[in-house]
């Protein structure tokens, strides 16, 4: 049962996607005890994939939960992922189609227990690949949402920890950057502007999952690409990021 973190039409949704996991917290008031789902893993077996309400810091948040392997969401490429720090902090997009869950929400969910990350990728010829990471942690805003990630497996190749280009594209330990908040490691250069995304950037990236959506398999430095699979900046048809408890 996987929540989507980010979503894009042919991108980080389902294919951009929403990620969530579920745990139940009991909150006792004077008159009642409320059981609140905090991620998708708490949703009863046999339920349909779709939008569910979970509770993050006791606040309701709608997320998309992929509960069946044959589920899918519509991908249109209509959601723009080139947003500022505040938008990435709060989240944006349409939870039914393409969206970003929000860095604050990601940090709070991923701090509650151990989570895995799955990234599903599809090209314009109908070929599909995946990358799994056994550890996925996003720090608080005080750390600029620093990324901790490890334990790759899959058939897409590892574009995050051991990227094919070089160490300057490595994402482990990087802070999140946006067009208005430059946290990359290169002075006088804004990688988020070059890649037209909000992402964990050192100098550049081999995994630009929040890039611009280009149709037909175009090659673009600001497109949605995973270079350890396509070995280029081939812009993918779809990509999704999903989390579940490990």
Image (tube, grey):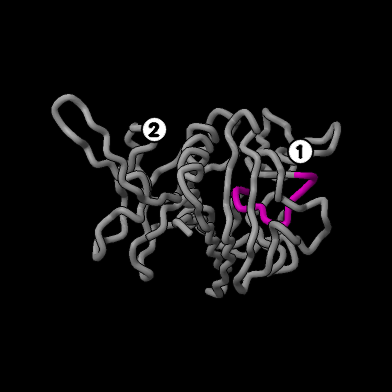
Q: Residue at x 53, y 53 (%)?
A: 12
Q: Residue at x 31, y 46 (%)?
A: 24
Q: Which residue is the extreme one toward the right?
A: 187
User: Do the residues under discs 2 and 1 have CB atoms within 8 angstroms?
Assistant: no
- Whether 187 is drawn above or below 111: the answer is above
What is the spatial separation of the Cα atoms under label 2 and label 1, in whole angstroms? 30 Å
**Residue 173 visible in the shown view:** yes
Q: Which element is circle 2 on?
A: loop
Question: Of residues 51 and 237, which is closer to you in this image?
Answer: 51
- Whether 79 is drawn above or below 60: the answer is below
Provide the residue span drawn in magenta. Answer: 202-211
Which residue, given by chain and number where applicable, does mark 1 sit on? 184
The tag on residue 197 is none
Question: Of residues 63 and 139, which is closer to you in this image?
Answer: 139
Residue 244 screen position, x and y as percent: 45, 57
Q: Residue at x 38, y 46 (%)?
A: 95
Main secondary structure of the magenta stretch? loop
Q: Residues within 10 Å of mark 1 (few under 14, many from 20)?
A: many
**Quadrant where the N terminus lies?**
bottom left
Residue 130 screen position, x and y as percent: 56, 68
100 in magenta: no
Q: Residue at x 48, y 59 (%)?
A: 246
Question: Of residues 119 and 54, which is closer to you in this image?
Answer: 54
The tag on residue 57 is 2
Could you say which quadrant of the image residue 191 lies in? top right
Q: Which residue is the extreme one toward the left?
A: 31
Question: Of residues 175 and 83, which is closer to you in this image?
Answer: 175
Residue 102 screen position, x and y as percent: 49, 38
Residue 223 screen position, x and y as percent: 66, 53
């Amino acid at each position: 049962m996987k929540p989507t973190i980010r979503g894009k039409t042919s991108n980080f949704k389902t294919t951009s996607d929403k990620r969530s996991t579920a745990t139940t917290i009991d909150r006792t008031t004077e008159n009642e005890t409320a059981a609140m789902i905090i991620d998708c893993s708490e949703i009863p077996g046999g339920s349909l994939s779709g939008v569910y309400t979970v509770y993050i810091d006791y606040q309701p948040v709608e997320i998309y939960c992929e509960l069946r392997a044959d589920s899918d969401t519509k991908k249109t490429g209509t959601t723009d992922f080139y947003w500022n720090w505040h938008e990435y902090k709060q989240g944006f997009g349409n939870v039914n189609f393409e969206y970003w869950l929000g860095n604050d929400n990601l940090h709070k969910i991923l701090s509650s227990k151990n989570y895995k990350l799955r990234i599903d990728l599809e090209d314009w010829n109908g070929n599909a690949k995946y990358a799994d990471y056994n550890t996925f942690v996003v720090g608080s805003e005080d750390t600029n949402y620093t990324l901790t990630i490890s334990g790759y497996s899959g058939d897409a190749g590892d574009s995050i920890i051991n990227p094919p280009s070089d160490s300057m594209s490595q994402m482990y330990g990087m802070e999140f950057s946006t067009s208005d908040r430059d946290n990359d490691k290169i002075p006088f250069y804004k990688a988020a502007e070059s890649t037209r995304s909000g992402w964990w950037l050192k100098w550049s990236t081999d995994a630009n999952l929040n890039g611009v959506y280009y149709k037909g398999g175009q090659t673009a430095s600001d497109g949605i690409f995973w270079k350890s699979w396509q070995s280029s900046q081939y812009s993918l048809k779809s990509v999704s990021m999903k989390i579940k408890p490990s």
